[in-house]
Amino acid sequence: MVLSFNNISMSSCTTNGITVRVETQYLPEHSNPRGQKFIFGYYVVIENGSDITVQLLRRKWIITDATGVVREVEGDGVVGLQPTLQPGEIHEYMSFCNLFSEIGKMKGYYTMLCIRDNSLLEIEIPEFHMFTPSVLN
């Protein structure tokens, strides 16, 4: 699936020199509002601005929608990858989330391995909001 992001919502934060930026967009062609199925694409950029090499091992998402449903999703890597980022390197990926309402939010963290000393780092994924264009009218 090819996503075209028009900067509907963008969030950013930096933890231990590693910056995570997330941009979202509602995907009406994959959604079914009558069936309470709202699909949002998100594009993530992870930039290693630190002086250490890290490997992304795991991710944890906390997904909340306007109906009050809260889901936690954990797993290895991102979209099947566990990328290693040297200082100055960037990793980008796209994924999607389904909500049961027109409004929701996600946040979480990546667990990264510091290659230098095998310590683990929790890198914050900033909270970002997802909403259909109709809620802005």
Image: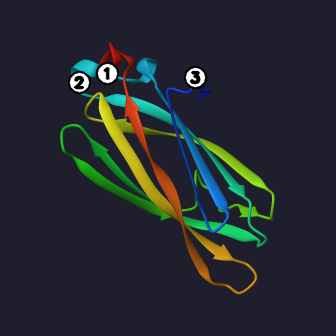
Is residue 81 among the parts visible in the rendering? no
Dot in front, 3 or 1: 3
When the figure is inspected, residue 93 is found, relative to residue 19, above or below; the finding is above
Direction from residue 122 to residue 82 in the image, left or right: right
Question: Who comes first in sequence, dot 3 or dot 1?
Answer: 3
| Contact check, label 1 and label 2, Cβ < 8 Å | yes
When the figure is inspected, residue 86 is found, relative to residue 103, above or below; the finding is below
| Contact check, label 2 and label 3, Cβ < 8 Å | no
Q: Which mark is residue 32?
A: 1
Type of amino acid under label 2: Gly
Q: Residues within 10 Å of mark 3 (few under 14, many from 20)?
A: few
* SS label for mark 2: helix
List the single residue furthest toward the left.
67
The quarter of the image holding the C terminus is top left
Direction from residue 83 to residue 27 in the image, left or right: left
The quarter of the image holding the N terminus is top right
Q: Residue at x 80, y 64 (%)?
A: 87
List the single residue furthest toward the top.
137
* SS label for mark 3: loop
Type of amino acid under label 3: Asn
Q: Which residue is mark 2?
A: 35
Q: Position of residue 106 (x, y in %)?
A: 39, 47
When the figure is inspected, residue 47 is found, relative to residue 76, above or below; the finding is above
| Contact check, label 3 and label 1, Cβ < 8 Å | no
Q: Which mark is residue 6?
A: 3
- Number of disc labels: 3
Is residue 28 among the parts visible in the rendering? yes
Q: Residue at x 24, y 27 (%)?
A: 36
Dividing the picture into quadrants, the one containing residue 120 is bottom right
Type of amino acid under label 1: Asn
Question: Who comes first in sequence, dot 2 or dot 3?
Answer: 3
Q: Residue at x 45, y 24 (%)?
A: 27
